[in-house]
Image (cartoon, rainbow, N blue to C red):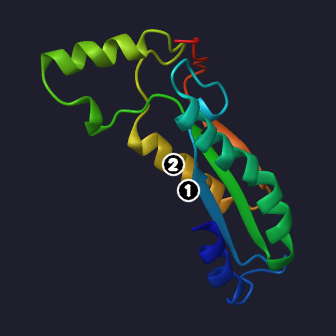
Amino acid sequence: MLRLAAAEIAKTDPVNEDGERGSIVNTASLAGIEGQIGQIAYSSSKGGVIGMTLPAARDLAAAGITVNTIAPGILETPIYGEGEGAEEFKQKLAAPVPFPKRLGTAEEFGRLARALLEISYVNGEVVRIDGALRMPPK
């Protein structure tokens, strides 16, 4: 997807005097940085996204395209279900998060993505959004 998006963005006219044409923001996972026991496939796939961030930013610099990656920790999503059992489970997930003691929100993720799209001097970065969570081995 990055390759296809970059090819289309590169065809556009620059939007400013720096020659900027656009930005790409990928999504990885905290697991790509510090995967847990039993996450070999998932962790390595997210680690691949993280690993391509800086080389892609460098390769696409000539075309005026920035590339960054967001590595979320535990975000509130429908995957956890609804109801009392789901709420208890989410509280257990949030327990090791230092601050704020909750799951991240889609709005917070979106605000970070927007910032990465708007601030062109942030380039080639992997940005964690995780409330300072560091994943235990399991």
> On residue 65, which mark appears?
none
How many other residues sit within 10 Å of disc 1, few (<14), some (14-19) or many (≥20)? few
- Determine the secondary structure under disc 2: helix
Q: For the point 35% across and 11% down, which residue is it? A: 92
In the depicted structure, whether residue 25 falls above or below residue 83: below
Discs 2, 1 touching: Cβ within 8 Å: yes
Q: For the point 17% across and 16% down, which residue is it? A: 85
Question: What is the three-letter code of the residue carrying label 2?
Answer: Arg
In the depicted structure, whether residue 60 falls above or below residue 8: above
**Residue 134 appears in which quarter of the rendering?**
top right
The answer to whether residue 71 is left or right of residue 124 is left
Q: CA distance from mark 2 to mark 1?
A: 5 Å
In the depicted structure, whether residue 113 falls above or below residue 56: above
* Residue picked out by circle 2: 111
The answer to whether residue 25 is left or right of residue 88 is right
In the depicted structure, whether residue 32 falls above or below residue 107: above
**Residue 82 appears in which quarter of the rendering?**
top left
* Residue picked out by circle 1: 114
**Residue 76 appears in which quarter of the rendering?**
top left
Q: For the point 23% across and 18% down, which residue is it? A: 87
